[in-house]
Amino acid sequence: MGMFLIKRIFTLVATLAGASVVVFLVLEVLPGNAAQMLMGPDASPEAVQALAIKLGLDQAPLQRYAAWIGGMLVGDLGLSYAYSSPVLELIVERLALTVPLALLSMALTTVLALVVGIYAAARHNRLGDVGLMSLTQLGIAVPNFWFAILLILLFSVHLQWFSAGGFAGWGEDFGKAMKSLLLPAISLAVVQAAILARITRSAVLEVLREDFVRTARAKGLSQRATLWGHVLRNAMIPVLTVMGLQFANLLAGTIVVENVFYLPGLGRLIFQSIANRDLMVVRNCVMLLAAMVILVNFVVDVLYAVIDPRVKASDI
């Protein structure tokens, strides 16, 4: 297990370094004047030059990259041009909403997908299986932002059970804050749950054909005990792979959904920073999202070894 973790940690660090290089190259080294873009086409050359010096754009690219990486290692992400505040403070403030929203969406996705996928597999080619798979196909086809608008129309405009947007804040009322996140979480979870349910069904059906399942049933185990006690664990490898990718999609999906529900999260910060041409905030937010995706994939790799020891053995 030790060698397995060492290899995965080395891969994690190398991938983070590669992602930082790509983000830096795309946002700062490609042709174009970042200071001119920030100031606008009508800015004077003197103002553009002053901003370029303030942002460190007069330095060599390698020097700027080293300064950025060094700043990240000590928690100094620079100063936002649009907000005149430290970028780290802005990100931490917005993560307090985005992370709970993504985790709530992932929890809803997992519960819905496992229940639907296992139920459909247990009733293969019956009415329940066909009906649920038809619904999941519809769920895959529906964009999450359009589904979010439908939820607002139904539960906020007509039924008036939920607020149409905004966030109550964690310090005011925890229950009210969670209620503010419920509709956005559902709109994010439905599409992902539809995809994961189909993957779960396929994985469970493949395991159900194995000899050890027939042996378990022959020994007198009920279908439910066999499904949850033997089949599900062996079917979790492809399911975990998709879950890792879906968490990345959920983080990216918050950019649109947070704007639909007017939530002050990381996605809305990125959207506003792009509109304000705040390159400092955009660069660090994109790197943060990339790092989150890489870390999630690292956790998924470790879970592979926990669930199926053959994965760990084959990697050593």
Image (cartoon, helix red, strand yellow):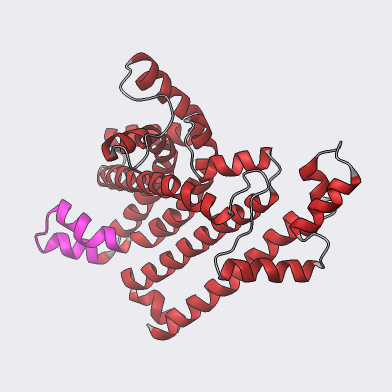
Q: Is 228 within the magenta?
A: yes
Residue 192 image position (x, y, % from top left): 43, 43
**Residue toward you, 89 or 207:** 89
Report the residue at 33% width, 32% height from top: 131
Report the residue at 33% width, 18% height from top: 160
Q: Quadrant of the N terminus?
A: bottom left
Quarter of the image for residue 274 reads top right
Q: Is 137 on the left or on the right of 79, as rendered?
A: left
Name of the residue lying farthest toward the right: 45
Does 243 sit above or below residue 161? Answer: below
Residue 97 image position (x, y, % from top left): 42, 45
Would you say residue 130 is visible in this rendering? no
Does 99 sit above or below residue 235? Answer: above
Report the residue at 51% width, 42% height from top: 253
Name of the residue lying farthest toward the top: 158
What segment carries the magenta color? 212-233
